Amino acid sequence: MSTSVPFSKLWTEDELPLPEAQPGYAAPRRYRFGKLGSRHVLGKFGYRHRRTEGELYKGRANDTNVAGSMHYLFRAQSGSNSVMDGTDIPKHACKICRTPFSSEKELEEHMRAPAVPDTTSTTIVQTVQPNQKALSVQDDQEIMRPISCTTNADGSETSLVVEKGCDGKRLRWFIQHGIEGLSKKQAKVAIQGSQVFVNDSVALDASRVLTFGDVVLVKSIQPASSSSAPEIEILYRKDPILVAFKPSGVRTKGQFPGTLEASIEQQEGHRYDALSKLDSFCPGLCALIRSDCGLQPPPAISHSMTALVFKAVPESWKPHREVTITVEPQWKKRKRKMTPQSVPLKLMPLGTTKEREDSMQLTTIRLETGTACSTSSICQYLRNESHGVVGDSNCRQEYLKVRRSIRNRIKDKMCIGCYRVEINGMEINCEVPEKLLWSFWDAHCEARHL
């Protein structure tokens, strides 16, 4: 049963008298009050609204198993007609689902098996991709987005009117698509912060179903600006090469807003191409070269990375260990065009924390590599050697063995970064954060014992 339309519009109490709900019938409270599903009038009888996304759904849905459950079949009272939209039902039409038939015989066959799907007709449902803002429509299909949208002079309030095409939509979806540039998270935060009003009443339920004619008022919320770019610190400049510090969470390559290359282009007024391959989660120094310089051959660049890993490394790694790792393209399109590369890597352990009963040992390692090595490939190699990087989501078992006070300070952040770059013999350095140093955590544990 679809819950995009309120239950009161599908059935009336006169046509479908409900029996009295007995103790033990009701579904768990979180299903009856909208925590994990919609608020439904049948929740007191055990109904749970679950979205399983069709036959391709691979998640857990054990509570949808109906083995051993009781089934109720409701029949409309004789002589009553459904009044979903105020129109009369055709002569040979089902009074429950309103499906028309050409003859009374077909209608009788339908009523004998109301739960069997109709195999003679096919319904095409147009789905919307998650990143699709404007929905494309054809001919007589209505636009599924709010049309009436007004903002006051100072921009502190935005008023949205639910049109017919958005009747039955959820409040969070309606706000996200009604205000241009508004993200899903911003819409949810606005609802939780009592900044959204529906028909002059504050609305705190993001899954609330809206009806045609509702007026939604959104206060003190501004959409994210796509033109804003983070300020990037430049540590070295010698035309046509720059060395900039890339913060964590910023993508290195790409000409769209928010990437390192786009931010440098906005600051410098020229387009630059990144020579370093740092992943989004990895902060550090990145070398960039101006796109129109035509410098041949490209400069020789080496990177020195610092990482905090689990466990004490073997003695064979000291004073250093030279290995060759395989760098594979991560994206499907690149996998068809690029072949895996073999890249040399030099590992130098700097120190290990003392062995303690309540915490796993941590080791600081310096890794020297060339331009062609990516951070994710280094993390994968260390993970295969049983010395994964602290904060790696694939090393949860090791992470839980670290002392709680250390985990509270790391906060699931990847403990790896690039803090030294050498370009044609010129070294550019920046300070290594304390959280990557074994001596800092050793002193922290000693202080906790005092």
Image (cartoon, helix red, strand yellow):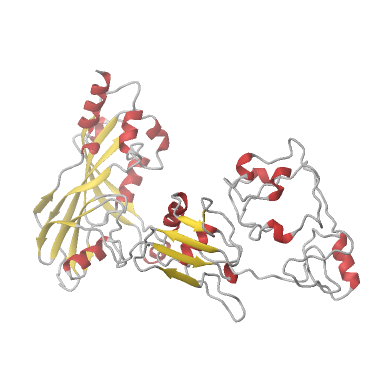
Q: Residue at x 69, y 56 (%)?
A: 7
**Percent of width and height locating residue 252:** 28, 59
Please determine whether, in this image, residue 268 is positioned above or below residue 381.
below
**Percent of width and height locating residue 72:** 81, 49
Please determine whether, in this image, residue 363 is positioned above or below residue 34.
above
Quarter that holds the C terminus: top left
Looking at the image, which residue sits at the far bottom? 139
Please determine whether, in this image, residue 228 is positioned above or below residue 319.
below
Kindly tell me whether residue 261 is visible in this rendering.
yes
Kindly tell me whether residue 313 is visible in this rendering.
no
**Percent of width and height locating residue 247:** 25, 52
Q: Residue at x 73, y 44 (%)?
A: 45
Is residue 147 found left or right of 393 in the rendered image? Answer: right
Q: Residue at x 35, y 64 (%)?
A: 338
Quarter that holds the N terminus: bottom right
Is residue 319 found left or right of 21 in the rendered image? Answer: left
Observer-nearest residue: 398 or 223? 223
Is residue 323 found left or right of 60 in the rendered image? Answer: left
**Percent of width and height locating residue 305:** 22, 46
Looking at the image, which residue sits at the far top? 450
Looking at the image, which residue sits at the far front? 200
